[in-house]
Image: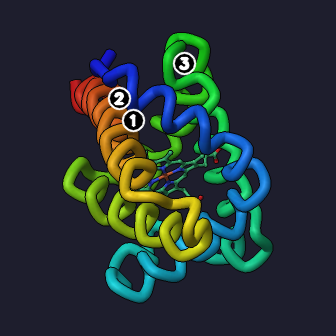
Amino acid sequence: MPDINPNTIELVKSTAPLLKKHGKQITTRMYEIMFHNHPEVKQQFDLSSQANGSQPAKLATALFSYATHIDDLESLSSMVETIAHRHVNTHVQPEQYPIVGESLLQAIKEILGEAATEEVIAAWTQAYQALAEVFINREGQIYQEQSG
Ligand code: HEM
């Protein structure tokens, strides 16, 4: 499990109510930014789940769960398993994580406006990297199992 500093944990947790309220708006915007800047990524997604909002809703739920359990990642293990398997099925690669990360941070800034202080953005940058590391490691194991 990655090491996340206590200040980051506190800041990320403090954004949970904002994520609850604006999460779907943030993730909807995130996909817009990502598909605009990296159109090649679109082919991995079921675009009907974008259109009906189910994928942005799932991502918003996952981010809210993460914000509230960032200091207890064990409790998220079944969520991580489901997502990691879905990612492997859709051929997600480690080098794609920064693309999602930059799009997400940009969307958080746009939607939260003044509430997205420099400190909040720095905390989410670190928190996202930690979560990405969890997925990259788990997905690496699953890819390995499949090839073996
Ligand atoms: C920490 C970062 C990420 C989180 C929290 C996350 C979260 C999720 C969630 C909650 C789902 C839905 C799983 C389900 O069906 O129950 C999902 C699916 C998916 N994710 Fe991620 N994801 C992340 C990073 C990425 C990256 C880097 C990519 C690469 C482009 C990616 C591509 C996908 C794709 C293609 C699907 C399947 C969507 C579909 O069926 O249309 N994700 N992800």
The residue singled out by tag 2 in the image is 134
> Residue 32, relative to residue 69: is it above or below?
below
| Disc 2 to disc 1, C-alpha distance | 5 Å
- The reply to whether residue 120 is visible in this rendering is yes
Q: Which residue is more in the foreground, 51 or 75?
A: 75
Residue type, label 2: Val
Q: Residue at x 73, y 57 (%)?
A: 57
- The reply to whether residue 46 is visible in this rendering is no
- Say if disc 2 is inside 8 Å of ligand 1: yes
The x, y position of residue 58, in whole percent, is 69, 51
Residue type, label 3: Ser
The residue singled out by tag 1 in the image is 131
Quadrant location, the N terminus: top left
Quadrant for residue 4, please give it: top left
Q: Which residue is more in the foreground, 133 or 94?
A: 133
| Disc 3 to disc 2, C-alpha distance | 10 Å
Q: Compare marks 1 and 3 and give the one earlier in the sequence.
A: 3
